Amino acid sequence: MKKVAYIASESVPFIKTGGLADVVGTLPKVFDKKQYDVRVIIPNYLCIPEKFRNKMTYVTHFYMDMGWKQEYVGVMYLEYEGVKFYFIDNEYYFNGFTPYGDVKWDIEKFCYFSKASLSILKAIDFQADIIHCHDWQAGMVPVYLKTLFAGDLFYTSMKTVMTIHNLQFQGCWDIATLKADTGLPDYLFTPDKLEMNKDASMLKGGLVYADKITTVSNTYAKEIQTPYYGEGLNGLLSARNESLWGIVNGIDYDIWNPQTDSLIAKNYTVKTWKKYKKENKKKLQEMMGLPVDEKQFVIGLVSRLTDQKGLDLIDRVMNEICQDGVQFVIIGTGDSRYENMFRYYQGIHPTKVSANIYYDEAKSHMVYAGADVMLVPSRFEPCGLTQLMALRYGTPPIVRETGGLKDTVEPYNEYDQTGTGFSFANYNAHELLATINYAKVVYYDHHENWEKIVERAMVQDYSWGQSALKYQELYESL
Ligand code: ADP
Ligand code: GLC
């Protein structure tokens, strides 16, 4: 039996700001419980819903050195759908309304979290074979393990995997602050270790010290070894190329299932979608304040509204997109620049654009089910989950060919009648527009071909099965 500890800043169903939470909460469920004991460690944020917090039980607490001070570390526990979750309890650090806020404070918070997560393994007597760290918030774990914890026999045989969900965020701050926050010695803050352009990067620390590195698609694994996508770490990632694996994400097929989803208006399958999917479209239009008309070509977008997601391309051509026969439903939150951009377009095209500037899991299901296409024109996309959900709901994605989008959406080819969606290569607004227009032509003028695209999309398998096997192979290789 292999013991694996997942360390991450978010996990469904407790706390989620993006796809990281979906992965951390879903992947541990998939491993064979006879072979793998996978447990998950996340912070006990005050913003985790009461219904979960009330069910947690107290395990233990102790005090831990953090630089010049001592910090309280409490451990709370909850088993959810067969997975054991441990929550690091500390009200000083985890009392915000959201998991992240001020960057400098977040850096101190997750230095604490990384060290506390390692420390609790001993307190709960879970001598993990593998510690699987996710993103910069857990980046200091491999560093601590190979330095401060190296002399402790309990920890010496542990191996680490560092998974990059997003290279853009690294937990970078000046060296003096990070030294104080981590309590780690000077020799670690050099360019071959944590130093990054005269500052220090927590993620870089993880990438230097982890035994294996993974990222969430094959294409992104290649892209991050180039300057354009490498965020200053392409040299290090190329040097560690032998230890870098790309493993594409899956989604939870129990939750994301149009046949059983209780959050959509009418359930359907690949056999019945022609009859029932449109009921979801009408309900979506009604819900989102658009004219109810099943003949409209409805474009959906469910996204964090940040530069990563290619929203400036949409901005350039939005008026051209909003032609006759098109409606555009957006659900998202993020940078005010993009929030206001979509509000503005709703203002000038009130019968065509519905801008819903909030986070709403339930309504997102209605968009996946009710839209005709899902737009994901990202500048970069390590994996992307929204296109996978869209495929499953028979809503062909329109994507830019980058990262996981390239690996999971096969562009429609009208000559050999293959493909599950539409794609464009360059980060260019007119390529995006041309691709949307092409999809529209297929939808209106070659509907029999459109139906085949939908059906091919729906039968793709992006459940976790295959990818979990790859993670097992990785764990065994350690
Ligand atoms: P990222 O992690 O970069 O945000 P992903 O595509 O991997 O992108 O994951 C995004 C996840 O967050 C999906 O589960 C998507 O449905 C969800 N999501 C994003 N924005 C919203 C929103 N405003 N309301 C509901 N769900 C959202
Ligand atoms: C990140 C990436 C996204 C990926 C998710 C889960 O947030 O932006 O592409 O799907 O992590 O791995």
Image (cartoon, rainbow, N blue to C red):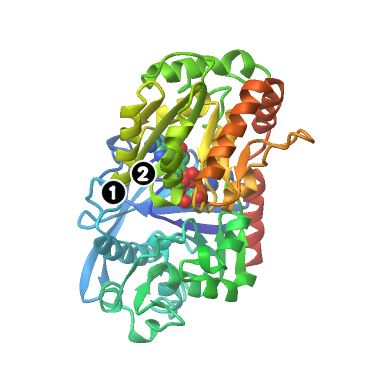
- Helix or strand or loop: what does disc 1 sit on? loop
Image point (74%, 34%), residue name: 414
Label 1, ligand 1: CB separation under 8 Å = no
Q: Are marks 2 and 1 in contact (CB under 8 Å)?
A: yes
Whether 284 is drawn above or below 8: the answer is above
Mark on residue 45?
1
Residue 251, image x, y percentages: 55, 40
Marks 2 and 1, how far apart at CA: 8 Å
Name the residue tied to disc 2. Answer: 15
Dot placed on the residue nearer the N-terminal end, 2 or 1: 2
Image point (48%, 58%), residue name: 5
Q: Is residue 131 visible?
A: no
Check disc 2 and give the amino acid type. Answer: Ile
- In the rendered image, which quarter contains the C terminus? bottom right
Check disc 1 and give the amino acid type. Answer: Tyr
Question: What is the total number of numbered labels drawn onto the structure image?
Answer: 2
Residue 395, image x, y percentages: 57, 29
